Amino acid sequence: MWAVLEPVIRSGETFTWDRDTTEADARARWFKDAPGQAFVAVTADGGVIGTGELHPNQGGAGSHVANAGYMVHSAHGGKGVARALCAYSLEAARDAGFRAMQFNAVVESNVRAVAAWQGMGFQILATIPEAFNHPTLGYVGLHVMHRKL
């Protein structure tokens, strides 16, 4: 999975993680305790081409809303891998008893992801202006997106 995670993290274009995150730190952050989970998308021969993670967005009284994240290997971008990971996570979240899914930080310049999530029923609830420092575009907004399950 590090072959998928590392280039996405290092690019600094779509995740709020430090660009120098180590493999050990990424694993500790990506793998979740139940009802959370990490999962992968694989090719027919078993090669990992994408990964996702699912967990409660908040604890306690907010634990009925899920949160998830997805990373796809750049060679497989635009082929529906992220949509498939999202579809899986929506079903897994529903099966785990979550009532909704919320994305806390969708970079507004990641227009392909924004369109994919909107196509899957997510709505932009708010955009936090200049909340993300993109490595080439400078400060851009972060969308908070939500959908009921």
Image (spheres, grey):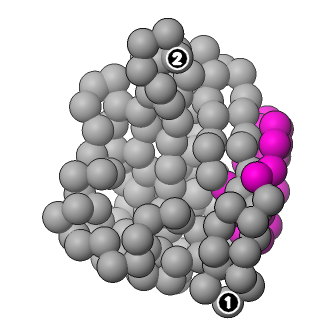
Q: Earlier in the sequence, mark 2 or mark 1?
A: 2
Residue 85, visible in the rendered structure: yes
Above/below status of 117 relative to 96: below
Residue at 47% x, 75% y is 8
In the rendered structure, the answer to whether residue 60 lies left or right of residue 127 reads left
| Residue 59 found in image quarter | top left
Residue 136 marker: 1
Q: Residue furthest bottom?
A: 136
Q: Residue furthest left?
A: 24
Compare residues 108 and 130 and report the one nearer the observer: 130
In the visual, does 95 lie left or right of 23? right
| Label 2 Cα neighbours within 10 Å, binned few <14 / some 14-19 / many ≥20 | few
Image coordinates for residue 113, horizontal then vertical, percent: 71, 60
x and y, in percent, of residue 19 in the image? 41, 77
- Report the amino acid beneath label 2: Gly
Against 109, is 143 above or below? above
Determine which of the numbered discs, if any, sits on residue 62 in the image.
2
Within the magenta stretch, is there residue 112? yes
**Residue 102 screen position, x and y as percent:** 63, 34
Count of marks placed on residues: 2
Give the Cα separation between the discs numbered 2 and 1: 35 Å
